[in-house]
Image (cartoon, rainbow, N blue to C red):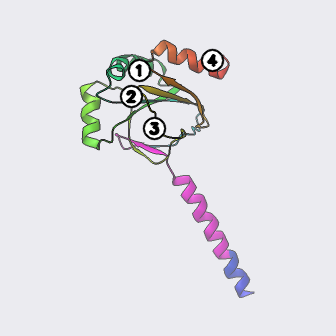
Amino acid sequence: MKKIVIVLIASLALLIGLWAQQALRFDFTTLDGETHRWNNSQGDWTVVNYFAEWCAPCLREIPELNHFYQQNKDKVNIFAISFDPLNNEQLLALQQKYNIQFPVIDSLNSMPWNRPPNALPTTYILDANGKVQKQLKGEQSAKQLIHTINVLKGL
């Protein structure tokens, strides 16, 4: 009887541990220290834009992405991610230099796409479950992004 109780307690502890690990897991962190998951419990869609400082089209689209962010921040998440491996100080300097107004990812634990893009700029549109619904290559405008999301949502 004592062995059964010990096995039950150990099993319960293991289940609680697995649940806690899953509950505390995050997919990425932004420069402001916030942790996030690709699947979004609020039902929001997510836009992820890969950029680099040496990429002229990337820099040209930043004002449009800022405009998209300002117009849609309550219903669509948007994040920037540097194609180049940069430390926090370098990312913060880029964010300030180019006035990137939306969150910049500084630590990526997992990504719902197979590998980093092979061309820049590249933008991924993810549904609320964190599944990539569309990959867009080249410069994007705020109008194009909202139109693409609406089409994907069936609106």
| Residue 21 among those drawn in magenta | yes
Sequence order check, earlier mark of 2 and 4: 2
Q: Which element carries disc 4, helix, strand or loop?
A: helix
Assess whether mark 1 and mark 2 are in contact (beta carbons under 8 angstroms).
yes
The residue drawn where x is 56% and y is 53% is 23
Compare marks 2 and 1 and give the one earlier in the sequence. 1
Please identify, in this view, whether the residue under mark 2 or under mark 1 is nearer the observer: 1
Query: Mark 1 is on which residue type?
Result: Leu
Q: Which mark is residue 134?
A: none
Label located before the other in sequence (2 or 3): 2
Residue behind mark 2: 102
In the image, taking residue 3 as reference, residue 37 lies left or right, namely left
x, y percent for residue 26: 49, 48
Picture coordinates of residue 15, whole percent (x, y):
64, 65
Q: Which mark is residue 151?
A: 4
Q: Of the residues under marks 4 and 1, which one precedes in the sequence?
A: 1
Quarter placement of the N terminus: bottom right
Label 2 to label 3, Cα distance in Å? 20 Å
- The magenta segment is 9-34
Q: Secondary structure at mark 3?
A: loop
Tell me the quarter of the picture where residue 133 sits: top right
Q: Which residue is mark 3?
A: 116
- What residue sits right under mark 1 in the picture? 65
Q: Residue furthest top?
A: 143
Q: Is residue 125 left or right of residue 81?
A: right
